[in-house]
Image: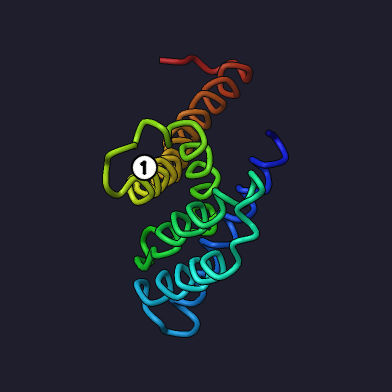
Amino acid sequence: MVETLIFNIILAISGAWLTYHLNKNLKLGPVRASGLIAMLVGGFYQFNTWFWHFDLPKDIPFILIGSTFIGMISSRKHFKNFNLFIAPIIFTLIYHNISKEFKGFGGALGTAACISLVVTIYLRSLKPIKKMIRPFRKVKVNTMKKMNKGEKNI
């Protein structure tokens, strides 16, 4: 179970990175980059049916195709290495835990990818809060130094 999860996380991270770099470096565009990976993975599984006898490979096309949706990030504002590393991990955890709940819904992979990206963008936005707290720490330290020197604190 854990080995399968780690393997799927590595696949998701590689799918997201590959899609992003096909999009940006080869200038394919986000849809073409995602479609190219989806066609390669889907074609490989369509023509090599002997993989279907094992339990592990059944999730590989879904995880890779879902991770390509994460790699379709084209905005410079939202692209960070953090997003392309953490979002596929969150996507894989969502896929493994909630994929049965999405039966009958179209776009379960896209929904899980969107949720994982929103979570990572939110986690990135938490970082500036530390910068807001830091000046208050300096004020407290300065007042403590003044009090130690014998000056009155008003």
Residue furthest right as drawn: 3
Q: Is residue 109 left or right of residue 145?
A: left
At horizontal 54% and vertical 48% (from top left) the residue drawn is 59
**Whole-percent x and y of residue 150?**
59, 15
Q: Amino acid at mark 1?
A: Ile
For the N terminus, which image quadrant?
Answer: top right
At horizontal 64% and vertical 57% (from top left) the residue drawn is 51
User: Which residue is under mark 1?
Assistant: 115
Residue 79, by quadrant, is bottom left
Q: Could you tell me which secondary element the residue under label 1 belongs to? A: helix
Q: Is residue 20 left or right of residue 55?
A: left
Residue 125 against residue 69 in the figure, above or below: above
Residue 70, by quadrant, is bottom left
**Whole-percent x and y of residue 32?**
38, 77
Residue furthest bottom as drawn: 26
Is 144 in front, or is 70?
70
For the C terminus, which image quadrant?
Answer: top left
**Whole-percent x and y of residue 144?**
57, 20
At horizontal 70% and vertical 35% (from top left) the residue drawn is 2
**Whole-percent x and y of residue 69?**
40, 59
At horizontal 42% and vertical 44% (from top left) the residue drawn is 116
Dot 1: few (<14), some (14–19), or many (≥20) neighbours within 10 Å? Answer: some
Is 99 in front, or is 114?
99
Is 116 in front, or is 129?
116
